[in-house]
Image (cartoon, rainbow, N blue to C red):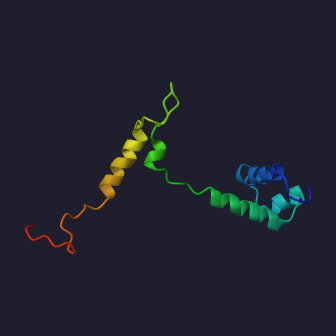
Amino acid sequence: MSKINNKNNEYAILYLHKIQKMDAATIAKELKISQKTVDQILATQTSEDQPKKSKVKDLMIRQTASKSTNSVAIMTQGASQQSDEAVKNSEPVQKNLPHIFRPNG
């Protein structure tokens, strides 16, 4: 177990860190690998744990059950709420922009 070249060791490190609440030095000693390797795996995992903001189009149901086509889109409750929040937080659009000349308006 001197090299970290398989997924089992990576999963063991993540399990010991998240579930068992072990620190990197203890994990390295337990699995007989370098602490640098443990730190690298934990650093990559914490960067992947950042929550990704879902888009409205990802929350829509686009595939029909009978034909398995993408010709119909159904808005789910989550997509509707996210769309409403986006409208509330957006700035109103100016109809008369200052760089467009309108002689009658």
Residue 65 in the image: above or below residue 90: above
For residue 93, which quarter of the picture? bottom left
- The residue furthest bottom is 99
Q: Quadrant of the C terminus?
A: bottom left
Left or right position of 47 against 37: left
Give 64 or 35, whichever is nearer the viewer: 64
How far from the left and from the top, in percent, is residue 76?
42, 37
Left or right position of 62 against 51: left
Left or right position of 100 against 23: left
- The residue furthest right is 2
How far from the left and from the top, in percent, is residue 63?
49, 34
Give 26 or 70, whichever is nearer the viewer: 70
How far from the left and from the top, in percent, is residue 37?
81, 64
Numbered disc total: 0
**Which residue: 50% across, 54% down?**
53
Q: Quadrant of the N terminus?
A: bottom right
Left or right position of 61 against 39: left
Give 27 or 88, whichever is nearer the viewer: 88
**Which residue: 48% across, 30% down?**
64
Residue 48 in the image: above or below residue 68: below
How far from the left and from the top, in percent, is residue 12?
80, 50
